[in-house]
Image: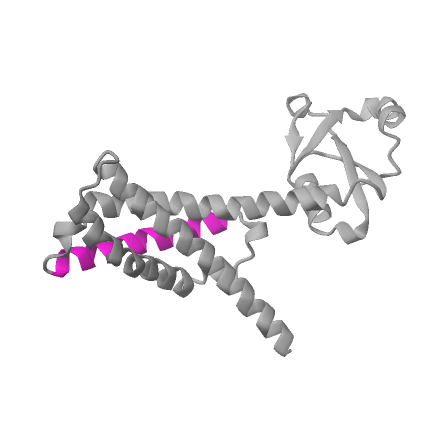
Amino acid sequence: MQRLRGTVSNKLAIKMALDAIAIFFSFILALALRFEFAIPDIYLSHFMPLVPAIVLIYLVVNYAIRLYARRWKYASFDELAALVSASVLSTVIVLIVVVAIPGVRKYVPVSVVLIGGVLSLFSMAFVRLQFRLLSERQMRKGMQGGTKVLLVGAGEAGEMVVRDILRHPEHDYTPVGFIDDDPRKQNLVIQGVRVLGTSAEIAKIFNKYAFDEVF
């Protein structure tokens, strides 16, 4: 149990550290864009000490919305929607702080806060996407052997089956392709698996792909 808690804590720390790096450089880039990469020294000397506080606000909001309780290797539209909500809320809080505290707005332009918020959203989403892509690449790499499966029907049910196969390589199935009689679905690629033809072409598909089972 203690080892499990340690693993969870390590993963949380890694996720927060990656977000912190993404947010930090996003706001530095926002300041650079604001002054067309010719940042006055006075802004650098006053803005840089404030960036860690901005990063902290974003991390606290992300944690409160439970973004770090999600598994990044399964990042989907729900993850993106939650990330957008967290980024908007964080940006609003930073804006309120900048406007409310005397003297801060002089060295933290509102445009930098807005640009930084947008860049932070994109950079954090990019990090999560890399985890998703890396996870899927590893799963597909581990599925080179095993039972070759041809899937009948390239609709929502078929997509769910492929997604489940990809998430559970221990079942030792490798989807070789779909067949579907809908002409609009021919040659489509669904979850990385192509629609190979229609039910009338099963024999030809078998000769080429030598599948073991049909789902």
Q: Nearer the viewer, residue 205 or 28?
A: 28
Q: Split into 4 quadrants, where in the image is the N terminus? A: bottom right
Asked whether, in this view, residue 157 is left or right of residue 129, the answer is right
Q: Nearer the viewer, residue 160 or 137?
A: 137
Asked whether, in this view, residue 82 is left or right of residue 168, the answer is left
Q: Position of residue 36 (x, y in %)?
A: 23, 33
Whether 199 is drawn above or below 122: the answer is: above
Which residue is farthest left? 102
Q: Residue at x 58, y 46 (%)?
A: 132
Q: Nearer the viewer, residue 178 or 141?
A: 141
Whether 2 is drawn above or below 193: the answer is: below
Q: Split into 4 quadrants, where in the image is the C terminus? A: top right
Q: Residue at x 28, y 55 (%)?
A: 51
Q: Residue at x 56, y 48 (%)?
A: 131
Magenta stretch in the rendered image: 78-101
| Residue 94 inside the magenta-drawn segment | yes
Asked whether, in this view, residue 142 is left or right of residue 208, the answer is left
Which residue is farthest bottom? 2
Q: Residue at x 51, y 48 (%)?
A: 128
Q: Position of residue 73 (x, y in %)?
A: 59, 51
Which residue is farthest front? 41
Specify the quadrant of the image occupied by residue 115: top left
| Residue 42 inside the magenta-drawn segment | no
Could you tell me if residue 161 is visible in this image?
no
